[in-house]
Structure formats: C-alpha cells, structure tokens
Image: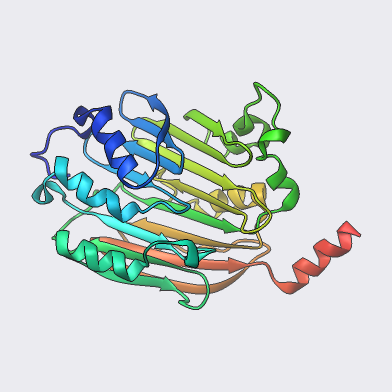
Amino acid sequence: MTPDFPPLRSLGDDVWRGIVESAGAKVVSVLRTEHCDAYILSESSLFVFDDWFVLITCGQTTLVDAVPQILRSIPAESIAFLVYERKSEHFPEHQSTSFHEDARRLQTMLPGRALCFGDEHGRYVQMFHTTRPYTPETNDPTLEVLMHEIDEDVAQRFISSHVSSGTSIAISSGIDAILPGFTTSEHVFNPAGYSLNAVKGEEYYALHVTPEATGSYVSFETNYDFRGHLGGLVDSIIKLFRPLTFDVVTFVPESEPELLVAGYELGNHVVHALGGYQVSYFHYFAPPSALRSARELEL
C-alpha cells in the first residue's frame, strides 16, 4: 500500500470477510499476532499485515471477483503494487473464467500487463501485475513451491479419517520443522484436505494439501528470506511430499537465484522483470529412471 493509507488491519474483520466471500470462500479461523491477522479459509489463506496482504484461493473460487470488493475499501490510488496469479489448473473446464478474461477485467480497474511463465501446453503460471512505478524493499522475497502428484502414502496423512483427534499434522509430518519458530494454525477438512498458516514477526508461510488420488496437489508459499539457501529449503519441502513434478516461483528484488534439486530434472526455466522484482519460474520433473526404480522397490 502507499504510505498515506491507514493500516490494513484497521479495516476490520467484516471488510476482510466480505473480500473473502466475494471470491467464493469463507473464513474458517483467524490467528492474530502483533504484526499479522492470518485467516484460514475454506479455500486456502489470507494474511493481512498493516501495509500489505496476500490472498490465496483455490478450487472453483473466483479470486478476480475479490478485486472490485477490495477497491470498495482501498482506493486504486492507494494500491502501490498488485500481482494477480493463476497456475495451470488440473480441471480448467470446471473454472468459470480463464486467466485472459480475468486479465482483461483487471485492466479496466488497475492498468497493468499479463505474463506467462512456463509451457502453455503443459505446466505454467500466469500473472497480471500493475505497471505503476514501484520499488520493492530489498528484504522482500517470495517463494512458491507448487507440487503435483504427491506420494500416495504421504497423501493418506491428510485424509480426515486417518487423523487422530488432537494430533497436530504439522508436528507429526515434520512440516513445522521446515521453518521452525513460527506460530501456526492448522485445519483438517472433511473428508480430505489440509491448510496451515504460520507467522513469525512480519514473515509468513502457508501450506495447503489436496490429497485426493486424482489431481493431488500441495502448495507452499512464504516471504521468509530464502536467499543463500534456496536449494536446501526447497529440498526439505520436496522430501516431505515426494511429488512427481513441481514448480518453483521466486520473487527477488535483485538478480535471479540458481536452483538445483537432487533427484529431479529441470524443464522450463523462465525469468521476467516485474515491478522491480526478478521473477523466476522453474519446472522440475522426476526422470523416468527414478519412476522405474520406485516401482521396482514397491514390488
């Protein structure tokens, strides 16, 4: 947000619930800390800090519908920078709009441009961002790890019938060890699904698991400063879920990072300059030899 706008948290729960509901989701719970209000949603997460926020939705929600609702409480001239992102969907035929339709609509409200990272015929991430001049803080990185077709045994841990009452999945699965020291809030959905919000000071991370056999998917996002140890952080996440393929997206206000992940091959690698950030997209996949070895071990 621009410096002249009041703290976003002062807008109150009713405003943020209205924004969430306009996108087709609902607030499940709220974790409040000194710096952040972290909402677990029926479809992902919302993190509200005093001068910026992150809204993540999934499924058949219409995130683009949240923007006009946001503009009812925050005038366009007070929005310093906005990024709207959609990844390639497992079932695009079930979505009510396409990214291109969303981008055209956003353009009428907040002038910007659209970019595609990846293979438009395979895995990709599309972004619309405002083009108003913006200079990010030097300590403002973002990391996304988007995992597809996770290990079946791991997925079973996120089926509600397999979760013991009172058990913390974050602790039992090792998720909380990825970035220790965060205050966390988690929710297990019935019959399947899992969300975790975590906050420490002005840092956050969110993890969401869709464990169903058809289209299993895990997303991880954080603004924790991963620079200098990106490979180790991504490796610790990947080892927990063992996906067949995954995408990594990084926003850094400087040169692009390098990333090698043991046991996977790098496919597409795309870099764009965006609002003062270098945004990098990496697509990784398990080579056929690794898949054969895994099947042989199962036998």
**Figure coloring:** rainbow
Question: In the shown orientation, is residue 70 left or right of residue 285?
Answer: left
Between 225 and 40, the one lying in front of the other is: 40
> Which residue does the image show at 21% across and 45% down from the upper left?
70
> Which residue does the image show at 30% across and 55% down from the upper left?
64
Q: Where is residue 20 in the image (x, y as percent from the top left)?
A: 33, 41
Between 19 and 269, the one lying in front of the other is: 19
On the question of residue 69 being in view, the answer is yes
Q: Position of residue 26 (x, y in %)?
A: 40, 37
Question: In the shown orientation, is residue 52 left or right of residue 198?
Answer: left
Q: Does 86 appear above or below 14?
A: below
Between 144 and 30, the one lying in front of the other is: 30
> Which residue does the image show at 36% across and 59% down from the upper left?
85
Question: In the shown orientation, is residue 257 left or right of residue 148?
Answer: left
Q: Does 189 appear above or below 183?
A: below
Q: Where is residue 272 in the image (x, y as percent from the top left)?
A: 33, 70
Quadrant showing the N terminus: top left
Q: Where is residue 257 in the image (x, y as percent from the top left)?
A: 43, 62
Quadrant showing the C terminus: bottom right
